[in-house]
């Protein structure tokens, strides 16, 4: 008698057997990887148009303080209404798109897992038919998210402990995770949002002992849908950033592709977990109904990798190309956190120099791409050097010898040959008999050496004094000095002329006696520059009286001296609590006309004076920034095109702003934004390519960073 032929089990029975297997996450990921092109198709179809439309919105932020910081897009200003409306529209479109993409991808995944493939158009139509229920689920998700955030904030207010707030929010989020199964129930079983949620929690909480309970289901969703995809995305971003050395194109393409690929893995985990729980809890007939209800005929067309791959790569490529080409003319800046890499090159007997957030006083371009920063505040002066653009290697060394007077601010200037001259005060004696004498240190990237002889006479350490340095017009050095007169009856201003950088044979000329009050601690009160024929031009800012005076010589021997009171002063910050630090800076242009920028003592405003003649008896005033508290004095340079560049602090918005001025017409451009608060230091110089390089402090409650910002294309 012939042997009976064993009948093969029905396809849905085989699928049910496969669905019962453990290892939901890894099996789901394997399925997603094998069928990635087909599973990513819904995301490509929906999010590609949304991404392209969103890119068009970049044109709206041309006037919104948009900046490319090291190739990355940032907004330094407050977004305007058009941008906010556009962003809200794109966000809503993305949310609606997700309500279609996720269920459509779940349908395709269920078809692949049960051996009944579903074509992409059929899956999309099934998702669209159930869109109202999916939107209601999304709305419920927003409500749950809001309630979770409110509960966490309430716990934080109640206990004052962030840990308890995080635990409350994490617990509520975990309890809400089984609702993800409702996506499959709505799409595959056609239930309403409420019934789908109830069914999701029934599937999660009941079943055979081998199927695991509620927490098994919840942890599967937590790791398979949230934790592992997030970790994979971050890992790929790190790998691309490392492999492409910060390439904007590589990073943009990777981010765009991950945005479309990750939903495929998430949806496949949801689909497989749904089938797993259904196979353990329901009958074969119920499982068969789900399989039979899949849309389409069960014969999907072949996957088309080229269109899907194009959709994966196109948005990121377009965005990266926009950043690289910069068709909208956004400001481009490079930014370096110097304090992340600084080291000291000095060895005992002197202790290693430290760095404080108030130390930055001036910046100078060295040889090639070298940058030298002069640091000084209530201690010995120091030099911080960057060996190249981006500060890949820094050096930090003393600029004054051990034993120098630390109670007076030092001054510095870059000589024509490239070295940095630094003022220092040697001292002898002790107590009330202590005497000091002015000297010079000449520094480069390798170290500092003293000048061969001191300058001027000894004086008591208790006499008020202040010094400013500037290179001569052709060579040598100028040293301006104010000293307090006896009985505090004003001060005497003198200039020392040095024919060579080491000041081997100095001669000093008294220029004027001023009613100003001398302070050894004011760091922006005295500025000197060299005019035509090496005439000294001295700016004196008295922060106590709020006055600003310019002292000029008719000839280089200063036989005739002209004193011009530019600002007469009056009620000052010391009385009206404007706060911050007042001070001034000056540049003498090639034709001899001074250009002055200062922070007014009376109201804290940032102002500029554009002198029409050599003595500045006539000038054009410009208010660059209105009254403000807690600013530091501005920084000023003149670029190769003759434009005045004034860097100042916008304390209200925590920004560094550069005013680019041609005469009295100025364009104000935010170039950097603090994460926390602006610190009490600001300096600027021109680099080897003639671009402004700004040093500033990003200050927080417990930490701070010294940052270099270089605008590459400042508007006129």
Image: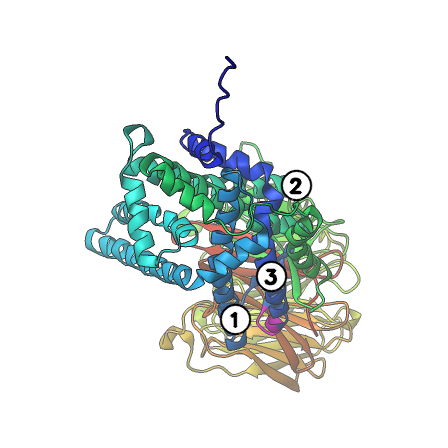
Magenta span: 60-65
Badge 1: residue crowd in 10 Å (few <14, some 14–19, many ≥20): many
Whether residue 226 is visible, yes or no, is no
The structure residue drawn at horizontal position 34% and vertical position 50%, both measured from the top left corner, is 179
Badge 3: residue crowd in 10 Å (few <14, some 14–19, many ≥20): some
Residue 437 percent coordinates (x, y): 56, 52
The structure residue drawn at horizontal position 68% and vertical position 46%, both measured from the top left corner, is 305
Give the camera-side residue of 400 and 507. Answer: 400
Q: Disc 3 vs disc 1: which is toward the camera?
A: 3
Dot 1 or dot 2: first in sequence order is 2
What main secondary structure does the magenta stretch of the protein show?
A: loop
The structure residue drawn at horizontal position 36% and vertical position 57%, both measured from the top left corner, is 141
Residue position for label 1? 491
Q: Disc 3 vs disc 2: which is toward the camera?
A: 3
Whether residue 538 is visible, yes or no, is yes
In the drawing, does residue 130 fall left or right of residue 383? left
In the drawing, does residue 533 fall left or right of residue 90? right
Q: How far apart are marks 1 and 2 (CA)?
A: 35 Å
Q: Quick check: marks 3 and 1 in contact, CB under 8 Å?
A: no
Q: Distance between the residues labelled 3 and 1?
A: 67 Å
Up the image or down, 314 lies above or below 114; here it is: below
Residue furthest to the front:
1
Q: Which mark is residue 716?
A: none
Residue position for label 2? 447
Image quadrant holding the C terminus, namely bottom right
User: Is disc 1 placed on a helix, strand or loop?
Assistant: strand
Residue 691 percent coordinates (x, y): 71, 61
Q: Residue 51 carries which label?
A: 3
Q: Quick check: marks 1 and 2 in contact, CB under 8 Å?
A: no
Q: Distance between the residues labelled 3 and 2?
A: 55 Å
């Amino acid at each position: 008698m012939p042997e009976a032929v064993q009948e093969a089990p029905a396809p849905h029975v085989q699928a049910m057997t496969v669905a019962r297997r453990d290892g939901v996450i890894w099996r789901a990921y394997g399925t997603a990887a094998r069928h990635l092109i087909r599973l990513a198709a819904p995301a490509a179809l929906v999010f590609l148009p949304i991404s392209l439309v969103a890119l068009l919105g970049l044109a709206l932020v041309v006037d919104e303080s948009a900046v490319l910081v090291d190739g990355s897009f940032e907004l330094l200003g407050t977004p305007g209404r058009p941008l906010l409306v556009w962003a809200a529209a794109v966000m809503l479109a993305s949310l609606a798109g997700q309500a279609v993409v996720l269920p459509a991808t779940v349908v395709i995944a269920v078809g692949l897992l049960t051996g009944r493939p579903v074509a992409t158009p059929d899956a999309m139509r099934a998702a669209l038919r159930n869109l109202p229920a999916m939107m209601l689920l999304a709305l419920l998700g927003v409500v749950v998210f809001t309630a979770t955030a409110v509960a966490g904030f309430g716990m934080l207010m109640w206990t004052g402990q962030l840990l308890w707030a995080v635990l409350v929010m994490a617990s509520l989020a975990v309890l809400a995770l089984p609702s993800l199964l409702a996506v499959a129930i709505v799409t595959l079983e056609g239930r309403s949002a409420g019934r789908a949620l109830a069914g999701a929690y029934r599937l999660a909480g009941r079943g055979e002992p081998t199927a695991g309970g509620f927490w098994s289901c919840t942890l599967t969703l937590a790791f398979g849908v949230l934790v592992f995809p997030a970790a994979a995305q971050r890992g790929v971003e790190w790998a691309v950033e490392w492999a492409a050395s910060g390439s904007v194109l590589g990073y943009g393409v990777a981010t765009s592709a991950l945005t479309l690929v990750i939903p495929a893995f998430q949806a496949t985990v949801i689909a497989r977990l749904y089938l797993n729980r259904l196979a353990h809890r329901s009958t074969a007939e119920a499982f068969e109904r789900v399989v039979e209800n899949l849309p389409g005929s069960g014969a999907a067309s072949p996957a088309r990798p080229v269109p899907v791959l194009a959709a994966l790569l196109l948005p990121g490529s377009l965005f990266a190309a926009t950043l690289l080409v910069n068709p909208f003319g956004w400001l481009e800046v490079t930014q370096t956190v110097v304090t992340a890499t600084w080291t000291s090159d000095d060895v005992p007997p002197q202790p290693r120099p430290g760095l404080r957030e108030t130390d930055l006083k001036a910046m100078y371009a060295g040889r090639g791409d070298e940058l030298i920063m002069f640091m000084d505040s209530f201690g010995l002066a120091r030099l911080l050097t960057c060996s190249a653009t981006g500060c890949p290697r820094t050096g930090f060394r003393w600029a004054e010898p051990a034993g120098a007077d630390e109670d007076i601010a030092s001054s510095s200037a870059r000589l024509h040959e490239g070295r940095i001259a630094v003022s220092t005060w040697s001292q002898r004696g002790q107590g009330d008999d202590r005497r000091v004498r002015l000297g010079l240190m000449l520094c480069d990237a390798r170290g500092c050496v003293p000048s061969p002889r001191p300058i001027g006479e000894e004086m008591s350490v208790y006499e008020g004094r202040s010094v400013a340095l500037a290179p001569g017009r052709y060579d040598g050095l100028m040293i301006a000095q104010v000293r307090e007169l006896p009985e505090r009856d004003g001060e005497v201003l003198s200039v020392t002329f040095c024919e060579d950088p080491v000041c081997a044979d100095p001669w000093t000329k008294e220029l004027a006696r001023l009613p100003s009050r001398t302070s050894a601690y004011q760091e922006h009160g005295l500025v000197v520059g060299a005019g035509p024929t090496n005439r000294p031009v001295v700016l004196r800012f008295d922060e106590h009286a709020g006055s600003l005076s310019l002292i000029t010589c008719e000839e280089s021997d200063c036989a005739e001296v002209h004193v011009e009171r530019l600002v007469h002063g009056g009620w000052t910050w010391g009385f009206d609590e404007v706060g911050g630090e007042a001070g001034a800076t000056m540049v003498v242009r090639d034709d001899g006309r001074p250009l002055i920028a200062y922070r007014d003592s009376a109201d804290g405003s940032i102002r500029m004076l554009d002198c029409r003649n050599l003595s500045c008896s006539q000038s054009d005033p410009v208010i660059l920034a209105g009254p403000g508290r807690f600013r530091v004095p501005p920084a000023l340079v003149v670029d190769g095109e003759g434009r005045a560049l004034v860097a100042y602090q916008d304390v209200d918005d925590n920004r560094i702003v550069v005013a680019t001025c041609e005469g009295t017409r100025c364009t104000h451009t935010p170039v950097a934004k603090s994460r926390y608060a602006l610190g009490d230091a600001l300096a600027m110089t021109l680099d080897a390519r003639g671009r402004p390089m700004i040093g500033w402090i990003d200050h927080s409650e417990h930490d701070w960073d010294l940052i270099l910002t270089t605008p590459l294309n400042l508007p006129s």
